[in-house]
Amino acid sequence: MSIQAINVRNQFRGKIREIIRGDVVSEVDVETPWGVVTSVITTRSVNDLQLVVGSEVVALVKSTEVSIAKL
């Protein structure tokens, strides 16, 4: 899968610094050149995206939501 285009303008490329797993949701901290961006996503998504500390990702920020795209 590759992202061809997306309507979210606030995109921050970085690496996952920490993942705090919960039963249903997990907290993912992404280290970017502008600081740490934190996303709360389902633990199922963490598993499906195979996210681990050090993974290169893009944090997509729209309003109050932060989504993660694995590179």
Image (tube, rainbow, N blue to C red):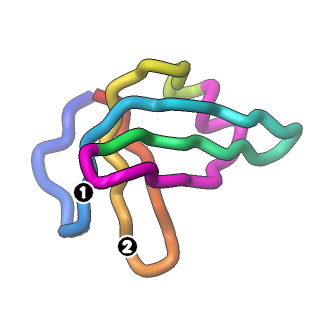
Sequence-wise, which precedes: disc 2 or disc 1?
1
- Left or right of 55, for residue 19: right
Q: Position of residue 25 (x, y in %)?
A: 76, 47
Q: Position of residue 51 (x, y in %)?
A: 52, 24
Instruction: Give the farthest residue toward the left.
Output: 4
- Left or right of 70, for residue 26: right
Q: Could you tell me the amino acid type at mark 1?
A: Gln
The part of the chain drawn in magenta is: 33-47
38 in the magenta segment: yes
**SS for tag 1?**
strand
Q: Around disc 2, counting alpha carbons within 10 Å, would you say few (fewer than 14), some (14 to 19), or many (20 or more)? A: few
Q: Quadrant of residue 4?
A: top left
> Which residue does the numbered mark 1 point to in the structure image?
11
Instruction: Give the farthest residue toward the right.
Output: 23
Q: Nearer the viewer, residue 47 or 10?
A: 10
Q: Quadrant of residue 8?
A: bottom left
Residue 7's place in the image compared with 52, above or below, is: below
